Image: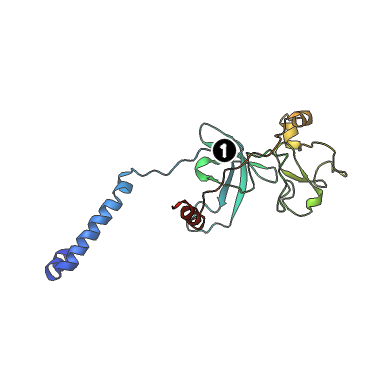
Amino acid sequence: MRAKEVQRLMPAAAGNLLIAQQRDKHRYARVRSGGYKPAFTRFEAGDYVYITECNRTNTLQVPTRENVLRVISVTPAGVATLKGRCGTERKENVANLKPCHLPDLDPIVDVRLAVPSVDLACEVCGFPDQEESMLLCDSCGTGWHMHCLRPAVTKIPKGAWICSECSEAGVKVEDVESKELPATPQARAKPFPGAAQRRPLSAQRRP
């Protein structure tokens, strides 16, 4: 009734109102019909994910922090077994997980050639300090303080060293040492040049 009154008194405004109503109708038509579905992310063992720690019964609560966990296994029903830095495991539905892309993970470079970053945290205590006493596992690349190990390690081991998790998984030091190392690191793809770099190149190509 009000729309007809506005259309009679102000034809231009009424036309804009009809356009807005038509736009909103098409905008939310897909959502109302159920055609919109969120993208489903498939997780595999070894992926890093995070869970927003919040009260799930109250959707208005602001999340306090985000814990980065590692995926151990995923069942066909969509239940993932996760493991934290402290070694505890928990189960979570994959719908509550989101991928975490750690910038210091490079699967192309061999882990034995990787140099531990300054902020590499210990798998036991979770602190990145005392990097001079940090041991880097030659199998998985994780960091471990010598005094955090049980039993504690007093001297830096010679040759290859593997952590307790890799040892329990069946990895042996002989297997790591016998693995053939590449003579030179593999060349990475060059990044696409930006606009500032493309201008000189295009100027050189011109006759």
Residue 10 at x, y percent in the picture: 15, 70
Tell me where residue 19 sits by quadrant: bottom left
Tell me where residue 83 sits by quadrant: top right
Residue 4 at x, y percent in the picture: 14, 64
Of residues 161 and 6, which is closer to you in this image? 161
**Image point (36%, 44%), residue name:** 36
Q: Residue furthest front?
A: 207
Instruction: Locate the N terminus by quadrant.
Output: bottom left
**Coloration mode:** rainbow
Q: Residue furthest bottom?
A: 9
Q: In the rendered structure, which amino acid carries the disc numbered 1?
A: Ala
Q: Is residue 153 left or right of residue 128?
A: right
**Image point (11%, 68%), residue name:** 8
**Image point (80%, 43%), residue name:** 149
Of residues 164 and 191, which is closer to you in this image? 191
Query: Could you tell me which secondary element the residue under label 1 belongs to?
Result: strand
Residue 143 at x, y percent in the picture: 74, 45
Question: What is the tally of numbered marks visible in this picture?
Answer: 1
Q: Which residue lies furthest to the left in this view?
A: 8
Of residues 190 and 121, which is closer to you in this image? 190
| Disc 1 residue crowd, few under 14, some 14–19, many 20+, Cα 10 Å | many
Residue 186 at x, y percent in the picture: 64, 39
Of residues 49 and 53, which is closer to you in this image? 49
Q: Is residue 35 left or right of residue 155?
A: left
- Label 1 sits on residue: 80
Q: Residue furthest right?
A: 154
